[in-house]
Image: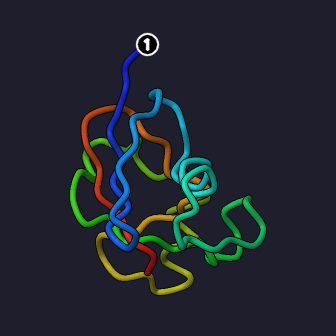
């Protein structure tokens, strides 16, 4: 199974995780500062800046894309509860 390296810039922690993991799951395991509300992609509480490696995340679903637009999310941001890691290296920090 492919692996990916995720770095949380705010706390200086890097971890290796299996592809298919969502950013919020990794954040919870390492104690990163990404907060969340609904975990369903509707509230936009878990908005996260993708510092680098955006291409190593699955494209946003229609639901996530709409939530990002509705909440005027800045370019380069994703919802941690929806952003699925597909491989490579990713650096993130809470928005």
Can residue 74 be seen at all in this image of the molecule?
Answer: yes
Callout 1 environment at 10 Å: few (<14), some (14 to 19), or many (20+)?
few
Q: How many marks?
A: 1
Can residue 62 be seen at all in this image of the molecule?
Answer: no
Which of the 4 quarters of the picture holds residue 34?
bottom right
Q: Residue furthest left?
A: 52
Q: In the rendered image of this protein, does residue 70 appear above or below residue 6?
A: below
Q: Residue furthest right?
A: 38
- List x then y, in percent, for residue 69: 48, 77
Front-lying residue, 19 or 16:
16
Q: Which image quadrant: the N terminus?
A: top left
Q: Residue furthest bottom?
A: 72
Which of the 4 quarters of the picture holds residue 2?
top left
**Label 1 element class:** loop
87 to the left or right of 17: left
6 to the left or right of 52: right
Which of the 4 quarters of the picture holds residue 44?
bottom right
Front-lying residue, 91 or 38:
91
Residue picked out by circle 1: 1
């Amino acid at each position: 199974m492919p692996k990916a390296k995720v770095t949380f810039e705010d706390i200086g922690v890097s971890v290796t995780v299996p592809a298919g993991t969502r950013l919020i799951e990794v954040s919870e395991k390492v104690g990163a500062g990404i907060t969340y509300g609904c975990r369903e992609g509707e509230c936009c509480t878990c908005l996260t800046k993708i510092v680098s490696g955006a291409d190593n995340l699955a494209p946003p679903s229609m639901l996530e894309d709409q939530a990002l637009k509705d909440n005027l999310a800045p370019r380069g941001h994703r919802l941690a509860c929806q952003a699925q890691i597909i491989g490579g290296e990713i650096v993130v920090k809470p928005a």
